[in-house]
Amino acid sequence: MCGTRLARPERGRPPVYCSRSCQARAYRRRRQPLPEPGTPPVSRPTGVRTRQRLRIAEAVWRIAAGQGLEAASMRRIAAEARVSLRVVQYHFDSKHALLVDALRLLHEENERLARARIPYGMTDPCALLRAVLDEFLPLDDQRAFALRVFTAYYARSLTDPALAGVFLAAEQPLERLVADIIGVAEATGATAPGIDRAHEADLLVSGAIGLGLDVLHERRFLADVRRVLDYHLARIFPPGRPRGPRPARSSGQRPA
């Protein structure tokens, strides 16, 4: 089916597939109906398939958070997801493909939850930055769980380039987001003079993640970690500086 040369056995029928993954791919192709001649391709509904993939990915997350990725065999994942091994192989060609996709889905899920938690339309840059940094701390069960999963993936990504490509985005979106928030505040005069927003963003993101891990390891208390972040934010946004966008002047108003 995949073109791999198969050894002919001494007894019995010759094999058709080189592996169970190859057999699962052939099964998926047989289930797809052939389009009528001359009709454009139509995307098939993916609602059920997407939910199943997420259910399997969530099983990977639970295993990674509790036992590490080394314990995430295909059979263990299937048992945790309460599906058959064949269902897992139907959705994912290999264990490695499953681990990579589960990491992508975790990024998407965390971003969705973060957007729901951060108030829309917040105009105070310091408060907005504080809300963003809170997403790196284990403030509740969901964020503590996600931090454990990311830690398990981080250790694996040190020796796995495919996972590293998902885990360590080259464009550093988190640091860029924090730098952009500081840049907006800098334009309104809300920041301390002479700061470097890119360096401040690198320090805040790496510091918040590291401090969050210390909370998980019970090396620090959450309240102490938040005071450390508040200290650095007060250094960037000194008391008495303007907060939020400056009000627009009317055409007849003279500058002060």
Image: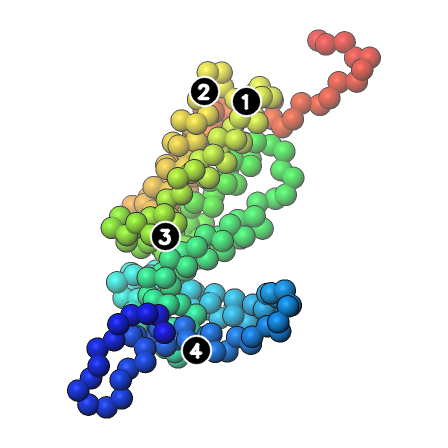
* Badge 1: residue crowd in 10 Å (few <14, some 14–19, many ≥20): some
Answer with mark 1 or mark 3, whichever residue precedes in sequence.
3
Q: Are marks 2 and 1 in contact (CB under 8 Å)?
A: yes
- Measured Cα–Cα span from mark 2 to mark 1: 9 Å
Task: State the colouring used for the structure image.
Answer: rainbow
Instruction: Indicate the amino acid at tag 3.
Output: Phe
Instruction: Indicate the amino acid at tag 1.
Output: Glu
Q: Is residue 11 left or right of residue 18?
A: left
Answer with mark 2 or mark 1, whichever residue precedes in sequence.
1
| Residue beneath disc 2 | 195
| Residue beneath disc 1 | 186
| Residue beneath disc 4 | 27
Answer with mark 2 or mark 4, whichever residue precedes in sequence.
4
Q: Is residue 122 left or right of residue 232?
A: right
Q: Residue at x 56, y 76 (%)?
A: 33
- Along the line of sight, which residue is nearer the eye, 219 or 191? 191
**Residue 150: mark in rendering:** 3
| Labels 1, 4: front one | 4
Q: Are marks 1 and 4 in contact (CB under 8 Å)?
A: no
Answer with mark 3 or mark 4, whichever residue precedes in sequence.
4
Residue 247 sits above or below residue 181 on the image: above
Q: Residue at x 43, y 38 (%)?
A: 171
